[in-house]
Image (cartoon, rainbow, N blue to C red):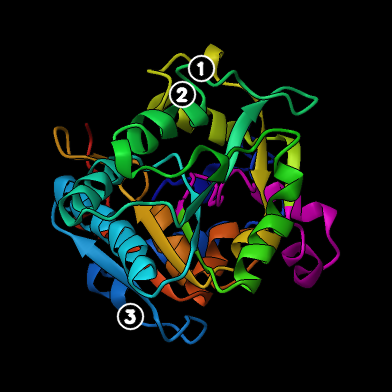
Amino acid sequence: MEKRTLLNTIKGSKFENFFPGAWDLNKIDWCCSRKPEEVYQKEEWWHQDFQPVGCHTLEDFNVMMGHEIAFQIKAAKEEGRDIALVLSVGPMGMYRWAVEFLKRWNVDCRHVHGFNMDEWSDEEGNTLPPEDSGSFRNAMDTSLYGPLGDLTVPENQRHFATRDELPHYEEQIGELRAKGAKFVVIYGIGWVFHIAFWEPHFAEDYTNMEEWSREPFRKAALLHPLTIIQNSITSFRSRITLVPVRANTIGPGIFLKADYTIGGVDGYLPCRNMMYQAQALWVTLKYGPDMWIPSSVMPRLPGKLFFVEPLAGPLVPEVN
């Protein structure tokens, strides 16, 4: 008997025109059908210095990714160079450990320049106030900058994706790199395979991937419904009515210039053996570079993509 799946029941449904237009759902399904061990199989388009890194548990993930962030900051210090970090708010657990390692090593962060990759906004690009508990600036202040104490990043070297600051990111990062700074992008991956809030449907505004790759940012960008739903689960305790539908965000014209990348996929809930980011992991690694799948370009850059090992599958149904 033929299986009943989204692929053979989508016709005439509310989902028929729901997904971004150029998504190949059959290819997405193929990516997710691979054997768990194939998650490490190097593809021809991967950068020679890109690698997925499996972590046994969520706790291991936080420690290992946090260590990688702290190590890059420490290494730059020892090399006598500045470091520009694009900072992601999601995942978040690794920042506690980045702080822990930097404190143990007594590494001050006066050479660090932090650039938050995105922020919620209204239709004019006005962002949430810094004290709002849902703002990404608040999250970074309370998880990284504040806990570092006397070792923290100078306030004038902390940049946030406001309507006034975001347009200057590309120039500021370029100037730092020209002076020898290392540029490191820390990222998570969304349900719709976004990097920052660079959504897949933005691709319809570009004639080709080269043009798409040059775009440095968007203000007041309209987000995909699946992004709103994901954030209602991960950050708003299911209150979908609290989630803004727009955001300011960096684009590929910034994140594709990274000298090194530190990615994280941690969407696994061991208490019920439920996961919400396994598809994001597999499609990122196996789909191949495509502007309609923004995260698919990240394996073309040097760096590490940390993930919680159960997300490798096998991705078969289990009723919860």
Mark-to-mark CA distance, 3 and 1: 38 Å
Q: Could you say which quadrant of the image residue 139 lies in?
A: top left
Mark before the other along the chain sequence, 2 or 1: 2
* Residue with the mark numbered 3: 41
Q: Quadrant of the C terminus?
A: top left
Where residue 254 appears, as percent x and y from the top left, is 65, 60
Tell which of 187 and 319 is nearer to you. 187
Mark before the other along the chain sequence, 3 or 2: 3
> Callout 3 environment at 10 Å: few (<14), some (14 to 19), or many (20+)?
few
Which numbered dot is residue 232?
Answer: 2
Tell which of 123 and 311 is nearer to you. 123
Where residue 237 appears, as percent x and y from the top left, is 37, 18
Q: Could you say which quadrant of the image residue 146 lies in?
A: top left
Where residue 293 appears, as percent x and y from the top left, is 60, 59
Q: Is residue 92 left or right of residue 169?
A: left
Q: Which residues are magenta?
A: 187-216
Is 120 inside the magenta-drawn segment? no
Q: Secondary structure at mark 1?
A: helix
Q: Is residue 164 above or below residue 134?
A: below
Q: Evaluate if marks 2 and 1 touch, with contact meaning CB atoms under 8 Å apart.
A: yes
Q: Secondary structure at mark 2?
A: helix
> Callout 2 environment at 10 Å: few (<14), some (14 to 19), or many (20+)?
some
Where residue 10 appears, as percent x and y from the top left, is 58, 42
* Residue with the mark numbered 1: 240
Q: Is residue 39 left or right of residue 272?
A: right
Which numbered dot is residue 43?
Answer: none
Q: Is residue 50 above or below residue 129?
A: below
Q: Amino acid at mark 1?
A: Ile
